[in-house]
Amino acid sequence: MIEAMLGGLAIVLSWPAIFYMFLGTVIGLFLGVLPGIGGPVILALLLPFAFTMEKVEALTFLLSAHAVGVTGGSVTAILFGVPGTGTNAATVLDGYPMAQRGEAGRAIGAALTASAVGGVLGALTLGALIPVLRPLVLSFGPSEFLMLSVMGLSFLSSLSEGDHLKATVSGLLGLMFSFVGEETIMGTKRFTFGQLYLWEGVKLVPAVVGLFAVAEMVSLLVEGGSIAGKASVSWRGGPLAGAREAIKKWWLVLRCSIIGIVVGIVPGLGGDVACFIAYGHSALTTREKVKFGDGNIDGIIGPESANNAKEGGALVPTIGFGIPGSAGMAVLLGALMMIGLTPGKELLQSHLDITFSLVWMVALANILGVLIMFLVTPSLTRLTIMEGSVLAPAVLIVAFIGSYLSSENIGDMMMALSIGMLGYAMKRYGYSRATFILGLVLGKIVEQNLFLSLRIHEGPAFLVTRPITLFLLIVSVLVLLFPLYRHKIFRKKTDRQPPGMN
Amino acid sequence: MKSYGEIIFGGIIVLMLSLFIYFSLGYKPSARIVPLIVAIPAFFLSVYQLYLSFSQEKSKRGEDRKKRRQDGPARRKIILQVWIWLIALVAAAYFLGLLPASLLFMFCFLRFFSHKSWLTSAIASMAFFTVIYLLFHTLLEKL
């Protein structure tokens, strides 16, 4: 085992693999910044180039690019309120308000540090789980998927600091929007009004672009001025301060990384779920005075740790069985087979050094990506003081292009515009966009797995007979009720624990 | 004016949820059960929220109404203008293609909304167009 680990490291650090890791990281960061291009799209775009490379070089190139896509996306989420990928949507909620206060550098520093730590933890977990992959992945079935999604929905209560009623209405509205399209069990077309475009339902990328990018840029144009009145562009007051805070909150980073890893391991849930569960968890446990949604730094640290950690988690079922943990992993799986590596027993037994090299690639690419972004952050933060009426049209055009690129259908631009109108009104009148997106992401997963679970287990008894399901149900109930007793718990904890521990 | 807008938006949400319920009733049982479980409580909650918005508006009626009137029409005009611009962008993308629409939109927006000079608008829009052309058309071959 140790020989394979060291062998894997030697593979990654050899020439020209290390060059391709650097190249893949830079390209992945750059593409991750563009809205609508992330995860699977990055891999799909780079796959043709990988055909011309040797086995290890191709793998290093692709995996490095994929691992850092969400890191790049966090920067635009903070600076412009435009999430680079769907998994950066939660970062917008508190990252953009921080940018509006002139604290973009601090927010980005915290995001990058949390991303690096989360990414490395995800990679290390992958390495640690290699010997126990099979029983771990096989222990999750539809009932566990259902309860994980229900647990995600239970965070609706924690994402609604302030107006719980409006946030709940938003979340339920998001759930209703998720039911648009072809129902997965019987194939019934729901709420499509005869439109072929709506058969696929409300797609996440145009929805996120509309809800956040369009709404925020319209708001900027209406209010006038720039994103921030003034921005701190110094290293000390900006990125380094944010990095220090993320390190200080190491316990939050660890917890949210674990959330990301677990969600990443479960095939089919997707990274969007991880970031919102982590966001909700951060909202439940924050001790910062700033309200969530107004620029609370925990609202950045939590989702960004989870985002990057989930990549390591998603590799677990992908290389263990050839079951892709996410859409991006599905493309990577194709790439693995294309270069002659078959996931599963063969990869784990005959090519263990290559398996461990994947672990090292994810870890090192995350660290490298973060270092590169730290270098360019002070320059990027200057964009927040640029005149809004000049910046906003450029951002809007790129955002609409991003929504178009998700499936190369003009309908996606119309969807982004329509949801943008909804998002602007939600922002203006105090309805939570976070809970809307949470409902949109989780609705279909809940419905599909509910029906599957009821059919497979012939009734609802699975809720108490399956241990993992029961555990997740209990956690969901506790999370739902947490806002009622959180203040009592934190008052007691503050009396007992030393300062600095979150 | 924000309160009137909030009431209208609340009403739109109630209407949307009513339509969701109405159309759900026409589907097969397996297709309608989960939407109805979600939509019916959502409908009642949204109606209650609308009632709360009405109550808040009534209680504020005497206060700063003059200020709200002053803010209202000018702001509404800008909001409407911005949305018309965005609708025009999407329409132009549909009829002309995304790249030409991007160039046209950027130039016209800078000139007629942001009130930049003709030269500044032309240079900025050409520079921006060059970047997105090279990126999305030449490099990524997506447009």
Image (spheres, coloured by chain):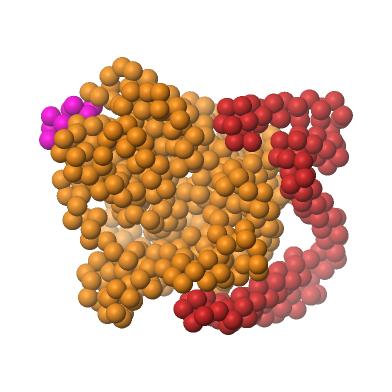
Percent across and percent down for residue B21 are: 60, 79
Percent across and percent down for residue A307 are: 41, 46
Quarter of the image that includes the N terminus of chain A: top left
Q: Nearer the viewer, residue B61 or A11?
A: A11
Q: Is residue A305 magenta?
A: no
Percent across and percent down for residue A159 are: 48, 62
Point 29% across, 40% down: residue? A123
Q: Against B69, is B125 above or below? A: above
User: Residue B142: which quarter of the image?
Assistant: top right
Percent across and percent down for residue A311 are: 36, 44
Point 68% across, 76% down: residue? B15
Q: Nearer the viewer, residue A162 or A477?
A: A477
Residue A414 in the figure: left or right of residue B41: right
- Asked whether residue A163 appears in the rendered view, the answer is no
Q: Against A215, is A483 above or below? A: below
Q: Which chain is red?
A: B
Residue B61 in the figure: left or right of residue A118: right
Number of marks drawn? 0
Point 22% across, 69% down: residue? A467
Q: Against B121, is A472 above or below? A: below
Point 35% across, 71% down: residue? A452
Q: Which chain is orange?
A: A
Residue A293 in the figure: left or right of residue A142: right
Q: Is residue A3 magenta?
A: yes
- Asked whether residue A13 appears in the rendered view, the answer is yes
Chief secondary structure of the magenta span?
helix
Q: Nearer the viewer, residue B116 or A393?
A: A393
Residue segment shown in magenta: A1-9
Q: Nearer the viewer, residue A423 or A343?
A: A343
Q: Report the residue that reaches farthest toward the top.
A: A15
